[in-house]
Image: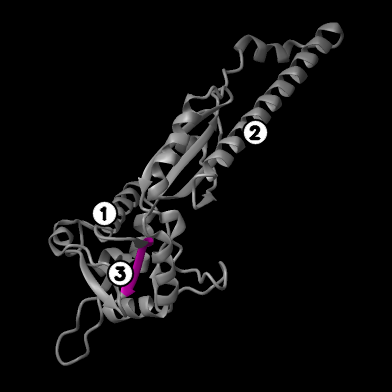
């Protein structure tokens, strides 16, 4: 989307936006930060008292068709996600930010600024909500189950009628009950972990559990929860995490990380008065991973 030659009007270039803030980041820190390797330096677009951290990016790689193709390649998707996070971190240098979805694209600064001013009320409310708060991620997995014994698995083929067959079916039924009982205990422990941590959080949201292919564990992920925690209560929250880790919970394994920029609680395209069906800002091109 480069400018035209001659006397014709210029076609606006593609701008990639990372985050909205009230408090502009330090100019030197912003200049030193890296967004997408293919783009220009990070810069600010001012919009009605708010600031949008953006980067000019080449249309050949970031128009709708090209970007969709790139985000379908795992290596490119990871690079884009890391670049987006660097841009959000740069925006968060001096105060709360509303991170935008990855690959939020506009055709030129005026369109980007208009998208922010059109949503200013919702963005101001989000910035108030996220001030002095961070996100913590907690994932609860069922305990790793031992593999099925090979000899027992092979016995199924040889099980016939009579006492031997009935004994085999009884063992299969008992194992099924044991597995269901272990799963129920693990779910109960996972829910107890969540209930305890919510006592120290301003808000919590459950994400879809990740698949075993993504987690690298044979045991299923039972809970994938993000907690929004006041900075003033961080010690209480991490203390609760420590007590949970020290407690004997044989049915589950718990992984926690943080503090993070509160991505899970910054849905800027939703009007808090209207719920999740509120329309997105106009004239915005957006590709979500």
Q: Secondary structure at mark 1?
A: helix
Quadrant for residue 120, please give it. bottom left
Residue at 37 percent across and 60 percent down: it is 131
- Report helix, strand or loop for mark 3: loop
Quadrant placement of the N terminus: bottom left
Whether 105 is among the magenta residues is yes
The residues colored magenta run 99-106
CA gap between label 3 and label 2 equals 42 Å
Q: Earlier in the sequence, mark 3 or mark 2?
A: 3
Residue at x 46% of width, y 57% of height: 265
Mark 1 vs mark 3, CA separation in Å: 18 Å
The numbered mark at residue 86 is: 1
Picture quadrant of residue 107: bottom left
Q: How many labels, in total?
A: 3
Q: Is residue 226 visible in this depiction of the protein?
A: yes
Front-lying residue, 151 or 224: 224
Give the number of the disc on residue 150: none
- Residue 150, compared with residue 112, is above or below; it is above
Q: On the image, numbered disc 3 is attached to which residue?
A: 22
Decide: few, some or many residues near mark 3? Use Cα within 10 Å; few <14, some 14-19, many ≥20: many
In the image, residue 3 lies in the stretch drawn in magenta: no
The residue to which callout 2 is attached is 188
| Viewer-side label of 2, 1 | 2
Image quadrant in which you'd find residue 10: bottom left
- Please give the name of the residue rendered at 53% of the width and 51% of the height, measured from the top-left corner: 205
Determine the residue located farthest toward the bottom in the rendered image: 7
């Amino acid at each position: 989307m480069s400018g035209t030659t001659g006397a014709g009007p210029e076609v606006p270039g593609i701008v990639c936006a990372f985050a909205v803030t009230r408090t502009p980041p330090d100019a030197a820190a912003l200049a030193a930060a890296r967004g997408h390797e293919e783009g220009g330096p990070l810069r600010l677009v001012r919009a009605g008292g708010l600031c949008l951290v953006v980067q000019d990016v080449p249309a050949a790689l970031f128009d709708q068709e090209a970007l969709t193709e790139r985000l379908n390649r795992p290596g490119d998707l990871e690079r884009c996600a890391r670049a987006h996070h660097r841009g959000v971190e740069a925006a968060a240098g001096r105060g709360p930010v509303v991170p935008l979805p990855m690959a939020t694209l506009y055709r030129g600064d005026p369109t980007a600024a208009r998208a922010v001013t059109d949503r200013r009320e919702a963005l101001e409310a989000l910035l108030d909500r996220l001030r002095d708060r961070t996100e913590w991620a907690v994932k609860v997995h069922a305990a790793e189950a031992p593999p099925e014994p090979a000899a027992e698995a092979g016995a199924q083929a040889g099980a016939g009628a009579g006492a031997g067959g009935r004994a085999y079916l009884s063992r299969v039924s008992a194992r099924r009950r044991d597995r269901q009982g272990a799963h129920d205990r693990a779910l109960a422990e996972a829910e107890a972990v969540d209930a305890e941590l919510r006592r120290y959080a301003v808000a919590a949201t459950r994400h879809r559990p990740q698949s075993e292919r993504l987690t690298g564990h044979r045991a299923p992920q039972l809970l994938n929860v993000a907690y929004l925690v006041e900075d003033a209560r961080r010690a209480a929250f991490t203390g609760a995490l420590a007590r949970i880790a020290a407690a004997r919970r044989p049915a589950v394994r718990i992984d926690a990380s943080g503090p993070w920029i509160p991505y899970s609680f910054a849905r800027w395209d939703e009007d808090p008065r209207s719920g999740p069906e509120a329309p997105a800002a106009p004239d915005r091109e957006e590709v979500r991973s």
